[in-house]
Amino acid sequence: MHKRYVFVAVVAVVWGSACATRSKGAEAGEPGTVTMESQGAGARNGTLCKESLPITVKLDDSGRKKFDPSPGSSDWLLCNTGTMTVTNDLSYAACLVIVDSEGKNAVTPKSVSASGGKADIGAPADGDYTLGVCQQNGSDCSSGCAHMTDTQQGGGITDTIKGNLSVVTSG
């Protein structure tokens, strides 16, 4: 009989402690309720996305191809209802390729004419993509750009320059 009272007392203490912990709320210095994952955990804020994303491909001061603005900031966060406009300031026609994480084309590769040519691309479905630009070989861009799934990024690695593009539901 004594064992039952001890068991009931232990259960009551544990249950009471759990209720008190749940109802007290956040103490000073403790985080309150979290309603969104951090950016690093994959959550993206749709209120920061852009309906119009202009990107220019040009040469930097050392003669290397680059994107303007550079990838990696909220500047490359496109709303799923938005449009990206790529301007080619290079002296040759270029191919524009957008691939998903598996290396498959998210949109049909597009040709962008030299010296100020532009291409408008509607946003693919929500997700993370790689945008690549390379010199056009031949009459079209059906063969895409080489090295789109390599882990290295930036100008000068290969003929293909690339950057990460995120598409989110506009909020």
Image: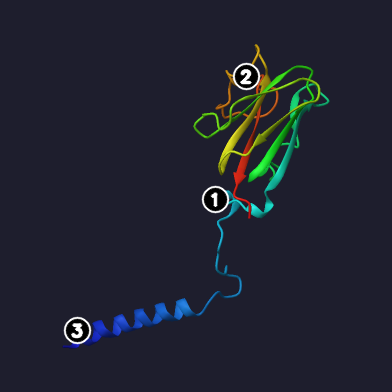
Q: In this orientation, which residue lies closer to the viewer: 105 or 73?
A: 105
Q: In this orientation, which residue lies closer to the viewer: 108 or 71?
A: 108
Residue 25 at x, y percent in the picture: 53, 77
Mark 1 vs mark 2: in front: 2
What residue sits right under mark 1 in the picture? 41
Q: Residue at x 55, y 63 (%)?
A: 35
Q: The N terminus appears in which quarter of the rendering? A: bottom left
Q: Earlier in the sequence, mark 3 or mark 2?
A: 3
Residue 66 at x, y percent in the picture: 74, 28
Mark 3 vs mark 1: in front: 1
Task: Tell me, for residue 3, which label it has, or none.
Answer: 3
- Look at the picture and state if 41 lies above or below 153: below
Instruction: Check contact, mark 1 vs mark 2: CB within 8 A.
Output: no
Amino acid at circle 2: Cys
CA gap, disc 1 and disc 2 = 35 Å
Judged from the image, the secondary structure of the residue bearing numbered disc 2 is: loop
Residue 131 at x, y percent in the picture: 63, 32
Amino acid at circle 3: Lys
Q: Earlier in the sequence, mark 3 or mark 1?
A: 3
Q: In this orientation, which residue lies closer to the viewer: 101 or 137?
A: 137
Q: Residues within 10 Å of mark 1 (few under 14, many from 20)?
A: few
Q: Quadrant of residue 4?
A: bottom left
CA gap, disc 3 and disc 1 = 48 Å
